[in-house]
Each structure stands twice: as structure tokens, then as C-alpha cells.
């Protein structure tokens, strides 16, 4: 049996994990905080952690990236994509007026994870009162649970349909995200290599810290990949947290670490005095691929 730590049941992380592990024998260990998700695997309570790392609308989830870099040493074993489809959730009886129509002026407070709420700002601005109170919590599943426990108070949540079903609430408005092409990337992290399925797509994630006394070092780093025609799919600078103005570069490469060209590029980067840390070399799965596999069974 595979043991997997993740955010609460009914969260997008939960839905995404169940699609990814669809044919496997899995025990899920749900946690309210992402720190507890990481620590579950770091402390060998679970074999893997499921970590949302990037979103179409909001980009990188910096808190999760910082945990992966600074707080734990857990290699990335796989990545996959899942749609982040958020909904307005609550009790229909609290929103419907005497004419049987929705009266959004009855919404006093809206609760959700900050990333999920930021994905729905257009809906919030257009339909909800200007003075509506916004409260951020640790996950969309947590926001729905809170609404369940606060009947008749004008409190509603933004979350998943699964969370609404789990808590006996109504999906009042479906797909309230600003953009329908809204997807989240997830990392599977842990010390055990993932061997559940095969894919032709591989990616390697590294951290590069530049030497302080080498002007133009970043240009030379990028050149080591460019002249070898190695495709970089992402590059992002983040503070090292050691001193002001000190940064590392997070780089994703569309190559397996086993590829000789990539090995030579990393050797060149190290030779000019850069520190290179490999976060993982892992298979990448698309949403369409996972759905196709699901339909085959």
C-alpha cells in the first residue's frame, strides 16, 4: 500500500491525487496545513506528499516552493496537471429570496484559500456586495467545512464540488473562476522513486546559486544550456534567505538527468563556481493522459 500525505478531503489536492493514483492501493493522510503535509513525509509517516506548486492564473506557489527548498529534503518524483475548477458553495435556502431568485446581497462573508479566492475575483466583484468580508483559510476544503458549521449567518465558501458533497452543502454557482483554462501543477515528493506508470515526458528541476564574484554568471549559466539546445521550461529567482540581495535560480529543464548533454551542461555550470542542487528528475503527466487511463479501466 502507498501512503500519501495531502491537504484535506475535498480540496483540489485531494481530487488531483485521486485521479493520479486512480488504479493504486493508497492510504491518504489528510492534513489541514501544507507544513504538516511536508513533515508527514519528511518524518517517514507517509511515503509521498502531494504539493500544489504552480497555477495558470497565480503562477508559482511561493510558500510551497520555499518549503521544498529550505525546510525539507524531499526529491520530486512525479508531476501532473489538474484543472482548478472552483464553485460558490453554501445553503441554497440562505441565498434564495421570496421570489425564488438568488439574492447575492445576502452574502456577508466569503471564505476560501487565498489562491482559490484570487482565481475568482471577477465573480466576486461582479456579483457579491462591495463590502463582503473575505476570509482566507488553509484550504478550500477547510472553507467549506467552516460554512457547514455556520448556518444562517450569510457565510459562503469557494471550493470544490467534492467538498460540497462531503459536507452536505449546495453548489450554488458552478465554475466561478475567472478563466476556464485554469490548471494547477502538482509535485509528488518523497524518497521513494515513483514507478506507477510510464510516460515519454521527463523533466529535471535544479537550483543554481551564482558565485558572488563572477559578473555575468547568469548569462554563462543560460549559455551552457542554449548552445546545447537544451530547452528550459521555467526559470525563477527566489531569495536564499541568507542575506539581502542573495538569490538562487530555480530552473526546470525538459531533459532527464540521465541525458549526457544535460550532465555536461551541469558540469560546465559547476566549473564556473556555481552551486547546483538537483531537486529531482521525474516523469510529467498531462491531465488528458490521466483521464484517458481512467476511461480504459
Image (cartoon, helix red, strand yellow):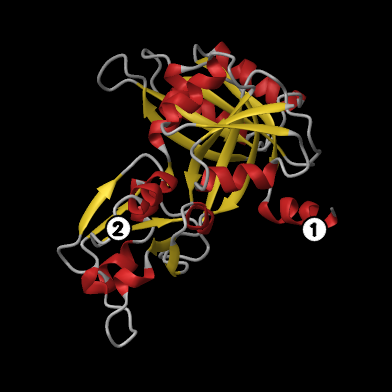
Asked whether 46 or 176 is in front, the reply is 46
Coordinates of residue 83 in the picture (x, y in percent): 56, 55
The residues tagged by marks 2 and 1 sit, at their Cα atoms, a distance apart of 39 Å
Q: To which residue does mark 2 refer?
A: 151
Horizontal placement of 286 versus 43: left or right?
A: right
- Splitting the image into 4 quarters, where does residue 67 fall? top left
- Splitting the image into 4 quarters, where does residue 90 fall? bottom left
Dot 2 alpha-carbon crowd within 10 angstroms: few under 14, some 14 to 19, many 20 or more: few
Comparing labels 2 and 1, the label whose residue is closer to the camera: 2
Residue at the image position 41 percent from the left and 43 percent from the top: 139
Asked whether 82 or 161 is in front, the reply is 161
Residue at the image position 31 percent from the left and 14 percent from the top: 242
Which mark identifies residue 230?
none
| Vertical position of residue 263 compared to residue 235: above or below | above
Residue at the image position 80 percent from the left and 38 percent from the top: 197
**Which structural element holds mark 2?**
loop
Q: Reading the chain from its start, which is encountered first: label 2 or label 1? A: 2
Asked whether 262 or 119 is in front, the reply is 119
Horizontal placement of 231 versus 194: left or right?
A: left
Q: To which residue does mark 1 refer?
A: 295
Amino acid at each position: 500500500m502507498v501512503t500519501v500525505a495531502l491537504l484535506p478531503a475535498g480540496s483540489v489536492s485531494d481530487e488531483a491525487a485521486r485521479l493520479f493514483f486512480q488504479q493504486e492501493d493508497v492510504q491518504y493522510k489528510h492534513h489541514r496545513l501544507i507544513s504538516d503535509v511536508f513533515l508527514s513525509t519528511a518524518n517517514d509517516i507517509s511515503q509521498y506528499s502531494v504539493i500544489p506548486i504552480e497555477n495558470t492564473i497565480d503562477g508559482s506557489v511561493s510558500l510551497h516552493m520555499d518549503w521544498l527548498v529550505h525546510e525539507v529534503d524531499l526529491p520530486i518524483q512525479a508531476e501532473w496537471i489538474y484543472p482548478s475548477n472552483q464553485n460558490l458553495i453554501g445553503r441554497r435556502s440562505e441565498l434564495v429570496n421570496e421570489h425564488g431568485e438568488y439574492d447575492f446581497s445576502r452574502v456577508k462573508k466569503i471564505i476560501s484559500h487565498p489562491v482559490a479566492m484570487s482565481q475568482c475575483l471577477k465573480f466576486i466583484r461582479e456579483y457579491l456586495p462591495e463590502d463582503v468580508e473575505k476570509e482566507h483559510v488553509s484550504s478550500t476544503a477547510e472553507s467549506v467545512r467552516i460554512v457547514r458549521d455556520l448556518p444562517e449567518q450569510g457565510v459562503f465558501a469557494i471550493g470544490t464540488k467534492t467538498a460540497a458533497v462531503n459536507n452536505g452543502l449546495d453548489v450554488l454557482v458552478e465554475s466561478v473562476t475567472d478563466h476556464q483554462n485554469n490548471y494547477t501543477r502538482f509535485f509528488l515528493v518523497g524518497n521513494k522513486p515513483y514507478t506507477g506508470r510510464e510516460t515519454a515526458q521527463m523533466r529535471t528541476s535544479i537550483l543554481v546559486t551564482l558565485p558572488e564574484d563572477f559578473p555575468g554568471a547568469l548569462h554563462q549559466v543560460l549559455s551552457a544550456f542554449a548552445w546545447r539546445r537544451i530547452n528550459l521550461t521555467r526559470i525563477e529567482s527566489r531569495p536564499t534567505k541568507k542575506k539581502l540581495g542573495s538569490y538562487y535560480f530555480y530552473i526546470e529543464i525538459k531533459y532527464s538527468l540521465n541525458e549526457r548533454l544535460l550532465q555536461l551542461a551541469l558540469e560546465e555550470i559547476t566549473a564556473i563556481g556555481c552551486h547546483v542542487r538537483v531537486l529531482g528528475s521525474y516523469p510529467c503527466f498531462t491531465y488528458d493522459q490521466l483521464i484517458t487511463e481512467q476511461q480504459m479501466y
